[in-house]
Image (cartoon, grey):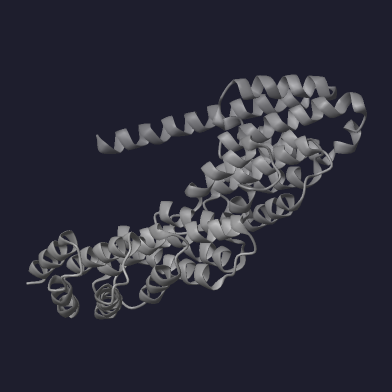
Amino acid sequence: MKRIISVALVLALGVMIDVADETTEVYKVLYQQAQGLPQKYAAILNIVGLNDKNTAPVLASALEELLLTQDAYSATIDQELYGKTITLLCKALGDYKDDAAAASLWTTVQDVPDPLAKAEALISIGKLRDRDYAERIALKLRDLNFKPTEDTDAGEKIACGCIVSLGKLKDVRGFSPVFFATDAWYSQRVRQQASESLSSIVDDPTDAIEAIIKSEPAERQLRALTAETHSRATNQRKIDTAVLALNLGHLKIANDKAEAKSLCDLRKLALCSFIAYKATGADPVDGCLSSYTKGFDDEEKLLGLAALGINGSDSAATVLRDILLNLNNDQQSGIADETRNRLAKAGIDASAVSKNKIVKPVLVAISINEKWSGGIIAAAQTAIKALQ
């Protein structure tokens, strides 16, 4: 009985294959009998309308034939319909995920003048997930990013095709050009598409982002670090990137107020990353100290203190101790103002969070310094209890 069933299945499968082959052959003859571009377009439109994946070889053959005979349709009257026909073929081949069509799709990108056809071919390569073309598409988008094309509408269509394709290919080589497309010369629609595609290209874009942070102006550094925080990289990778951004944010000298503000926002985002991801160890400490001592505003100074508290390492606790010791000595000497009080309170709270007993002696000193307000003394006493 099992043998009979097996034979029946083989026969049925053979019939199905024969039917599929016959159907494909019918479609092929239908296209071959079409005379002139209008009839070819109508035939392709009918074939695509069947929504049958078995027609992919016929459509691929039609695309190859039209690419080879492109010169025959160079007249102005033919160009629009030719581009429309190529676009239709490219979309169908991408939807059917016909891997064998990749080379023809790339030829379309290179040789067909119609920008919509180029864009659709690019998107279809993305649908095929053929990463052999990732670098070529990335380089094309990189070149487009540099300056507006003579025909800006055509340039935007092709750029958008590159962006969507790279988003689908999910290859790290596509990250940087898509990132730079988010603030290139394109319209808001294209830049928005770049922003939406950016997060889907690769789970961990850290290497590409760090390269951007090392070489680009402050505003782009800030956007790159923001992209890192929104990525699916590990927390440690995000911390490492934040350390780099914070250190560079302190080294760079601003040329104007706008750049100074961008650098400040970069440093604040790095400090917020330390807090959010609970960064520990020695690497973040110097940057946190610099934000406290040279911060653009009080918010940056306070974030530096909070990050030191979260850190909790001996190196971070030693810095907190020295900061509070200086504030306490100044208070004892009569040097006092509202800003110092606010920083002292934040430093005390950070010391409690650190759970590190290195800070305990200075907290005791503050708790018995009658020059401080009752609120500061009470905060120091509470922090001492937190360390016990």
Instruction: Tell me the quarter of the picture where residue 81 sits.
Output: top right
Residue at the image point whose x is 58% and y is 52% from the top:
179
Residue at the image point whose x is 77% and y is 24% from the top:
40
Residue 335: image location, x then y, percent: 32, 71
Which residue is at the far right?
Answer: 75
In the image, 353 versus 373, the foreground residue is 373
Residue 187: image location, x then y, percent: 68, 37
In the image, 262 versus 363, the foreground residue is 363
Residue at the image point whose x is 66% and y is 52% from the top:
137
Height in image: 385 above or below 55? Answer: below
Residue 71: image location, x then y, percent: 90, 37
Residue 230: image location, x then y, percent: 42, 51
Height in image: 152 above or below 270? Answer: above
Res 10 visible = yes
Tell me the quarter of the image containing the C terminus. bottom left
Across the whole image, how many numbered discs are drawn on residues? 0
In the image, 359 versus 73, the foreground residue is 359
Height in image: 298 above or below 25? Answer: below
